[in-house]
Image (tube, grey):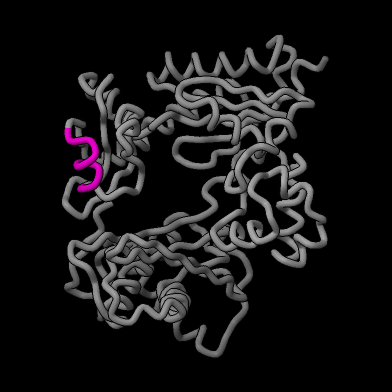
């Protein structure tokens, strides 16, 4: 039997923000801990497993978390610390194998097939990884192993907290098929409703539906994708060094913002900040996305992929305004607004010109020169001068 058949690993830190805070304050260990914005309008960024036992979860309003776990220790987010510890974790992983695909601040895929001469089994590699992260960084990690990339991610969820879950070769479908629909990558609210209408409640049910029916109901690409995943088919490999696939900014407002004009002004401010990040990174994005959270905490998002990749304030803002208009917000109060770009690539990529492009580009390029010399706040769109930067992140 091939002891390295399960060569895809998904490594995920357990309650990462909480565990980083515990590194700096050992008195938090063993306690119910909630990390996030501490004001009345803040939300939970991370909760320890002790706090989760009382119903606290990420993205919950902080006031609700206090109600459910009044005894918990509440800690303000320390994003600088999280970035530092994240780099330590990934440096540790690179010490095991360079074939690593970083997904976020606290998770990554690894392909360990090249380590078969150094370890007896893939399981031994997983044990070594967890031991190194614990000794070199000081925080727990969970690891999933499988023969397929997406199954290893599901396995790491089952490994939590602080464990290992191995899905052995030949047992993939027995593992997958009893799982609920939402475990499949790509199943959002609308897709879930469509699959439910077809009588599916588990991944196994999806595997039994004719692929042409799925393609007709969900679209050719998504239908084919879900049919393949439901049958354990995933030909993707680990892609090292991909870097960030998206860049975004958002604001949680101190008081709800009402009215399209005010929201567009806030969107312009955010677009300008986003453009600055893209400029410094030397990249542009193919897809523009916005996120809106209502006062009721309902969160919606919209995206568009324009003909050209974007990186300048004006072009980001224009696409963002169009997406905002499609939501028909009216006078509904908004507590959070965000904008970002996905499918990020080199800013030097070719750009198709439009009639207004030379003028807009000239203005943006001039503004960029000023910012490079005098800093990001040295020049900004006139309509947002004097507006309060209310980003709480």
Residue 52 vertical position relative to residue 367 in the rendered view, above or below = above
Q: Nearer the viewer, residue 359 or 209?
A: 209
Point 51% across, 83% down: residue: 357
Most distant residue in the front direction? 199
x 65%, y 31%: residue: 99
Of residues 62 and 382, which is closer to you in this image?
62
Task: Write down the quadrant of residue 275 in the picture.
Answer: bottom left
Q: Is residue 210 magenta?
A: no
x, y (%) of residue 219?
Answer: 72, 66
What's the residue at 64%, 22% (across, down)? Answer: 166
* Figure quadrant of residue 73: top left
Residue 82 lies in what quarter of the image? top left
Could you tell me what secondary structure mostly forms the magenta stretch? helix
Q: Residue at x 56, y 30 (%)?
A: 156
Q: Is residue 217 above or below residue 156?
A: below
- Is 357 on the left or on the right of 265, as rendered? right
* Residue 147 drawn at (x, y percent): 73, 30
Q: Is residue 389 above or below residue 99?
A: below
Check residue 69 for magenta coloring.
Answer: yes
Q: How many marks?
A: 0
Q: Where does the image place residue 139, in percent across and percent down from the top left?
A: 39, 22
Q: Residue 30 in the image: x percent, y percent? A: 28, 19
Residue sitting farthest toward the top: 120
From the viewer's side, name the closer residue of 207 and 272.
207
Pick the quarter of the image with the N terminus: top right
Q: Is residue 73 left or right of residue 182?
A: left
Residue extent of the magenta highlight: 63-70
């Amino acid at each position: 039997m091939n002891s390295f058949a399960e060569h895809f690993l998904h490594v995920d830190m357990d309650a990462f923000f909480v565990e980083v805070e515990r590194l700096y304050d050992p008195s938090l260990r063993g306690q119910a801990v909630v990390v996030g914005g501490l004001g009345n309008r803040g939300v939970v960024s991370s909760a320890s497993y002790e706090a989760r036992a009382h119903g606290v979860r990420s993205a919950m309003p902080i006031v609700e978390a206090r109600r459910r776990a009044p005894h918990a220790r509440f800690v303000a987010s320390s994003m600088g610390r999280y970035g530092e510890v994240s780099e330590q974790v990934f440096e540790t992983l690179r010490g095991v194998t360079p074939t690593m695909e970083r997904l976020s601040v606290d998770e990554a895929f690894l392909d360990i097939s090249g380590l078969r001469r150094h370890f007896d089994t893939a399981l031994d590699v997983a044990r070594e990884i967890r031991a190194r992260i614990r000794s070199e960084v000081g925080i727990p990690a969970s690891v999933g192993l499988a023969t397929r990339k997406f199954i290893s991610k599901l396995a790491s969820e089952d490994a939590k907290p602080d464990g290992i879950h191995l899905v052995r070769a030949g047992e993939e479908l027995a593992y997958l098929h009893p799982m609920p629909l939402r475990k499949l990558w790509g199943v959002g609210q609308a897709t879930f409703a469509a699959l439910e209408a077809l009588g599916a409640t588990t991944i196994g049910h999806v595997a039994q539906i004719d692929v042409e029916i799925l393609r007709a109901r969900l679209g050719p690409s998504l239908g084919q994708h879900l049919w393949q995943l439901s049958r354990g088919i995933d030909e993707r490999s680990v892609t090292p060094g991909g870097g960030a696939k998206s860049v975004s900014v958002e604001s949680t407002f101190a008081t709800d913002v009402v009215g399209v004009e005010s929201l567009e002004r806030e969107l312009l401010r955010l677009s300008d900040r986003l453009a600055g990040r893209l400029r410094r990174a030397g990249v542009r994005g193919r897809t523009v996305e916005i996120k809106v959270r209502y006062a009721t905490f309902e969160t919606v998002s919209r995206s568009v992929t324009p003909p050209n990749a974007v990186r300048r304030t004006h072009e980001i803002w224009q696409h963002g305004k169009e997406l905002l208009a499609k939501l028909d917000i009216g006078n509904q109060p908004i507590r959070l607004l965000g904008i970002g770009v996905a499918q990020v690539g080199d800013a030097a990529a070719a750009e198709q010109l439009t009639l207004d492009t030379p003028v807009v580009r000239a203005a943006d390029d001039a503004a960029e020169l000023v910012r490079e010399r005098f800093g990001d706040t040295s020049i900004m769109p006139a309509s947002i001068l004097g507006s309060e930067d209310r980003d709480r992140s």
